[in-house]
Image (cartoon, helix red, strand yellow):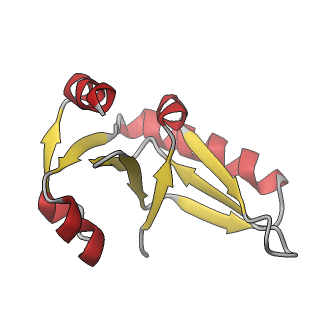
Amino acid sequence: MGSIIITIKKSDLSRHNVVKVDKSDTFRPYLLVNLNRAYIYLCGKEIIAESRDFVITGKKSIIAEYRKFWQAEHSKQNLSRQYRIVHNEVIAERDMAYYTHSAEVSEAEFMAELSKK
């Protein structure tokens, strides 16, 4: 069991799940990342999501099933995102240890800091 770290857009913050497609691959795999139970980092001007709930598949029909499953599970457990701001961007990007180089903030503080950049 692992986690995935991806760069997301500001518009993705309003979504529960992010779907990305690798168009360079002939298989065209779909990457579905659940943002409901994720760490959202602001590292410089980039928004980075780290989630343990992700699926890579070639079947688009599986995406809807996982979304329903995750929504049901998260509503039972009352889980939420954790917003963090990375202080030392150079070190965090070099060793991918965003968690150790960041501080947890509220969603309002995160959005305020994001609008400054």
Q: Could you say where residue 16 lies in the image, as x and y percent from the top left? A: 53, 36
Left/right placement of residue 92 relative to residue 100 reads: right
Residue plotted at (27% across, 42% down): 82
Q: Quadrant of the C terminus?
A: top left
Left/right placement of residue 112 relative to residue 72 reads: left
Q: Could you say where residue 70 lies in the image, as x and y percent from the top left? A: 55, 45
Q: Quadrant of the N terminus?
A: bottom left
Residue plotted at (39% across, 52% down): 48
Left/right placement of residue 70 relative to residue 74 reads: right
Q: Could you say where residue 109 lies in the image, as x and y percent from the top left? A: 19, 26
In front of the other: 74 or 10: 10
Q: Could you say where residue 43 lies in the image, as x and y percent from the top left? A: 28, 51
Residue plotted at (79% across, 71% down): 24
Residue plotted at (65% across, 41% down): 68
Left/right placement of residue 41 relative to residue 91 reads: right
Residue occupying the far right of the picture: 26
In front of the other: 34 or 110: 110
Residue 20 location, quadrant: bottom right
In the displayed structure, would residue 83 be above or below residue 22?
Answer: above
In the displayed structure, would residue 28 be above or below residue 79?
Answer: below
